Each structure stands twice: as structure tokens, then as C-alpha cells.
Amino acid sequence: MQSIDRQQPKPRRSRRRGWIILAIVGAVLAFSCIACTMFVSLLPNPPVQATRTHPTGAATTQLSETPLATPASSARSVRTQTNGSEPTSTSTPEKPTHGKPTIGGLYSDFLGKYGPPFQPGSDGSEDFWADQAQMTLLNVTAHDGKVVTLDIAGPDSWGKQQTQTYCEQFLPTGASEFNSVGGTIDFQSSNSTIVLVIYEQGACSLSIAE
């Protein structure tokens, strides 16, 4: 009786071994990623460089020059308007006359003695130099050709008495003092009352009272 050799089947490789290898590889990769992340987080942050924007051109600042206060400006600032109507300078050029320049007198007398004004003042007034050295300024306000306000600014070195003496030369002939309070002196002329106010530093003001 013939014997039959039966070949026994080869054992199949276990799939479990493959899955174990894959699991090990995956675990190693995951651990590597976690380790890298932790390592990076522990590194110090790089310094941040601040970016400064420089202007292309420097800004130019213009400083306006403020003129120093002068006796003339001080005299203008304290001038008191006593005439009821608004005084204005003569609208048409006047011919110079050669009478005595006084408060209440003709504006043309100032033109005759001091020449044309060198600049307009404020409120329709005109500025004259009383001397060639340009140390004494006369600010004249006229109404209908008559001087109603005269502000005088002399040198700072003038005292009160010297200022008063200089300013009184612009009083009309025959004007007499009848009242004095502090630096304010009232004079009576033939047709008006005149107020003389003496300030500091050679400044004074003559005006026609109402």
C-alpha cells in the first residue's frame, strides 16, 4: 500500500508582531515631537529690535522776535480817551504852520516844528520824533485839525519832575493848575480843561477833558 506524503502547511507570520513594531515606531516619533516642542519652549526668546523711524527732514521752527517794550509803547498803553467823539487823524494832508505845538492847538503846528510823522500810531494817531537823537517820541491824536491827546515818551532816565517840566511846555499859553492828585494834574485854559498824567520812566499824557 503506497504511502502519501502530506506536506504540512507553513506557519503564518503573526500579524501581531507587525502591529507591535508600528506601535513602537509611532511612540518613538511622538516622543521625539514632544521632546522637540519642550526643548524649543525652554529656549530664551530672541531679543526684539525696536525699529526707529527717523524723519527725513528736521522741522524748522521760526521764532518771532518780540520787540522790547519802549517808553513810547508804555505811553500808548496808558493813554486815556477823554473826548466823547472818536478822534481821528486828518484825512487830507495839511500844510505845516509854525505856531506853538500844544494840546488843544493845531495839528499843523506839530507838522511845522517836527516835520511829517515817521509812522502812524494806533487809533488814528501819528508818531513824531521830538529830537534829532530820536530819544523823545510824541504820539499825537487830532480831531478836526485840533490835537485832543498827546502822549510823550522820553528817556527812561527822566525823573518825575523832569518829565513834568518837559510835558508842561505843550500846555496852552495861560493854562493854570487848579487840582493835583498823585501823578494827575488838572489845568484850566481859556477854552478847555486839560489833564496831565505823569507816568514812570519819562512818560506822560496830555488830554482834553470833557
Image (spheres, rainbow, N blue to C red):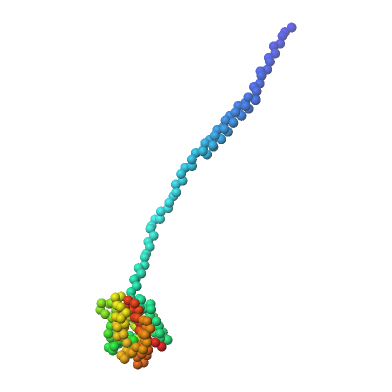
Which of the 4 image quadrants contains residue 12? Answer: top right
Task: Return the x and y of residue 140 as percentages of the image width and height.
Answer: 34, 82
Q: Is residue 185 left or right of residue 114?
A: right
> Which residue occupies 60% across, 28% down?
24
Which of the 4 image quadrants contains residue 162? Answer: bottom left
Number of callouts? 0
> Which residue occupies 40% across, 55% down?
55
* Residue projecting furthest to the right: 1
> Which residue occupies 39% across, 55% down?
56
Task: Return the x and y of residue 177 as percentages of the image width and height.
Answer: 34, 88
- For the question of whether residue 76 can be seen, the reply is yes
* Residue projecting furthest to the bottom: 190
> Which residue occupies 41% across, 88% down?
210
Nearer the observer, 181 or 143: 181
Nearer the observer, 38 or 154: 154
- Above or below, 116 against 21 in this view is below
Nearer the observer, 173 or 113: 173
Q: Is residue 136 left or right of residue 43?
A: left
Task: Return the x and y of residue 75 as percentages of the image width and height.
Answer: 35, 78
